[in-house]
Image (cartoon, rainbow, N blue to C red):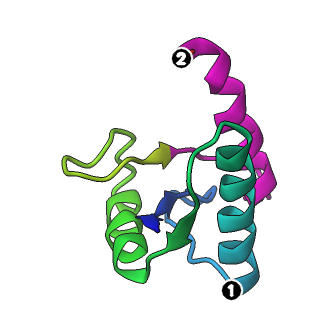
Amino acid sequence: MAAFAMIIMATTTTAQQFSEDEKAAFVNLHNSARAAVGVGPVAWNDALAAQALQHARYCQTQHIPGPYGENLWWSYGAGTTGTPADAMSYWLAEKANSV
């Protein structure tokens, strides 16, 4: 099973940590999208998530060099933090630009 991490940034320009429910939502939404195109499932990886969180704390909006794929997304505006579903909607909309 592949591992992945998410980067999401809150309005205060600091990265937020995810609850267990949010982690599960990201994994489930990703795996549904992956299954729709015949790609195997992924699992949450706390070590990769910690690396992504550190990267996001510096508001770096480019990919981290390395062997892992990443999906970058952030929300902005007063009182806006976004949800896993918001991020997935954005990422899935990008699919039309890459196929």
Residue 69 in sight: yes
SS label for mark 2: helix
Residue at (36%, 71%) from the top-left corner?
48
Q: Which quadrant, please, contains the C terminus?
A: top right
Residue that appears at 19% across and 46% down: 65
Q: Is residue 93 magenta?
A: yes
* Residue 76 seen: no
Image quarter of residue 83: bottom right
Q: Earlier in the sequence, mark 1 or mark 2?
A: 1
- Point out the frontmost of discs 1 and 2: 2
Residue 42 position in % (x across, y down): 54, 64
Residue position marked by numbered label 2 in the rendering: 98
Where is residue 95 drawn, in percent x and y? 63, 24
User: Magenta stretch?
Assistant: 72-98
Give the answer, above or below, for where 57 lies relative to 18: above
Give the labeled residue for mark 1. 20
